[in-house]
Amino acid sequence: MIKSDQPEGAQLKELNNRISGHELRETQLNSDLREQNQLIDALRLAEERSAMLAAIVSSSDDAILSKDLNGLVMSWNLAAERIFGYAADEMIGESMTKLIPQDRMDEETQILNRLRAGERLDHFVTRRMTKSGEIIDVSLTISPVKDNSGDIIGISKIARDITSQIQAEQKSAILSAIIASTDDAIISKNFNSIITSWNNAAEHIFGYTAEEMIGESILKLIPMDRQEEEPEIIDKLKKGERVEHFETKRLTKQGTLIDVSLTISPVLDLSGRIIGVSKIARDITDKKLQERRKNDFIAIVSHELKTPLTSIRSYLQMALMGGKHEVDKFTENLLRRAESQTRKMTSMIHDFLNLSRLEEGKMSLNLSHFSLSELIDEVVSEVVVLAPGHKIDYERSSGVSVYGDREKLSQVLVNLLGNAIKYSNEGTVVKLHCAVKNGLATVSVHDQGIGISSADQARLFERFYRVQDDKRKNISGFGIGLYLVREILKLHGSKIMVQSEQGIGSTFSFALPYT
Ligand code: ADP
């Protein structure tokens, strides 16, 4: 309070002093307030940052954990629970050693020593044990946790489960080893036919090194007259289809043509998208050579057998005709049987000759307009002799004429009728039917025989395929008759059809344009 007995000047001075004292305190207060606000802001920022860190830690795919210098767990995130199988409350305050497999116990001491020396361990690959005892591959990143004064107070660990990565690496190493050591050329290319990989066998088979071929077009290996194969293959693959055992020819660096069997598949990425093409090429030149030799052998043998057989057949026919009055019934019967067996052999030889021609790609048609009705008459009259125990039911057709190879179509009929007789019991009926329908001459051969299962029906026309079951074990054959039937009809633009039921019988049919 200003005393009133003071002189006026002194009072004024004191008043001024008091005012400036107030101002000083106010300034002080303001600065305290500002500092406090800054502190609060800093704290809030720190809190936010720590909340953010906590969220990152808990949502991480990697196990993030910390431990004190005694090795006791201080924090344990959700990923750690998922990877190691222990919940946070089972681990916090516990020793980490239960995660370490017996054979790696000393690893922990070594890690501690390195950390004490101020080192940080990045991507240290090792193995750990889960709660269920499973050993998993992990990659560890370990750093010391320091306080403000720089003293190490603990350790933080980030563990990534790399088991599937390691397995994938092992798988890919195995695959690489297989690819490098196989005898088949394994080549990959993109949809522009540019080669992206080329293994050792490809070098060996085609004569080009990987350096020479990677980045080059696959067309380099395809002979000029087969270049159209490539776009056809690519089209199929783009639709997700595979090309299997496609036999063709390819060109080596030396300019030689080799026989190859190609299996080509689309390469898919993890999402199922087609990203390229893989090709396995097997050199089948030797196999083809063997086949050619075998075919030549069959062709020569068949041809050589045909001549004497034709003579034997003619002699038998002459004996039968000329000697009718001179030979007794018994001998005549034997002559007839011998003659019918020679017909069977002639038919087999025809099959073999045609098989070898077909294999060599040398089967061609000798086309003409002819009467199918007459051909059927001839074939039926021949077959009747061979199957006296069967009733051949054939209502003669007349005037059905077609355009085709008479001899080969005769072979088709002989094979179908022969099978109908062979695979049905004596006393049953084999029915042959020929009619014109919708401009087509249709022929069907029906029997009341043992029938064919649907699984066998699907494979019946493959070369050398024979059904194996008890009912057929005493019936001989080579498995080429139906293969030839299919191929001969294919050359005529026609198709063989089968309908069959086991124990009931079978019907084989085909159609040819009526002329
Ligand atoms: P093959 O008769 O010489 O064995 P095919 O190629 O003519 O050879 O016939 C293949 C297989 O189809 C035969 O082994 C046989 O089991 C079966 N098959 C053919 N035709 C008939 C048929 N009509 N009835 C029952 N099975 C048949």
Image (cartoon, grey):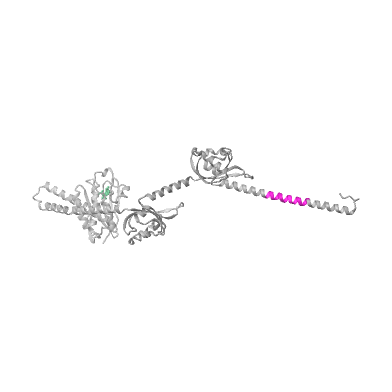
Q: In x, y percent, where is residue 458?
A: 32, 50
Residue 65 seen by the camera: no
Of the 4 image quadrants, the one containing the C terminus is bottom left
The residue depicted at 85 percent of the width and 52 percent of the height is 15
The residue depicted at 67 percent of the width and 49 percent of the height is 42
Inspect the magenta stretch and tell me whether residue 359 lies in it.
no
* Range of magenta residues: 25-41
Q: Please give left or right for residue 278 compared with residue 99 in the image.
A: left
Q: In x, y percent, where is residue 276?
A: 42, 55
The residue depicted at 63 percent of the width and 49 percent of the height is 48
Q: In x, y percent, where is residue 506?
A: 28, 49
437, 441: nearer the viewer: 441
Q: Is residue 415 above or below residue 117?
A: below
Q: Please give left or right for residue 251 compared with residue 145 in the image.
A: left
Residue 452 seen by the camera: yes
Give the prevailing secondary structure in the magenta stretch: helix
* Residue that protrudes farthest toward the front in the picture: 117
Inspect the magenta stretch and tell me whether residue 30 lies in it.
yes
Q: In x, y percent, where is residue 269?
A: 45, 53
Give the quadrant of residue 222: bottom left
Give the quadrant of residue 375: bottom left
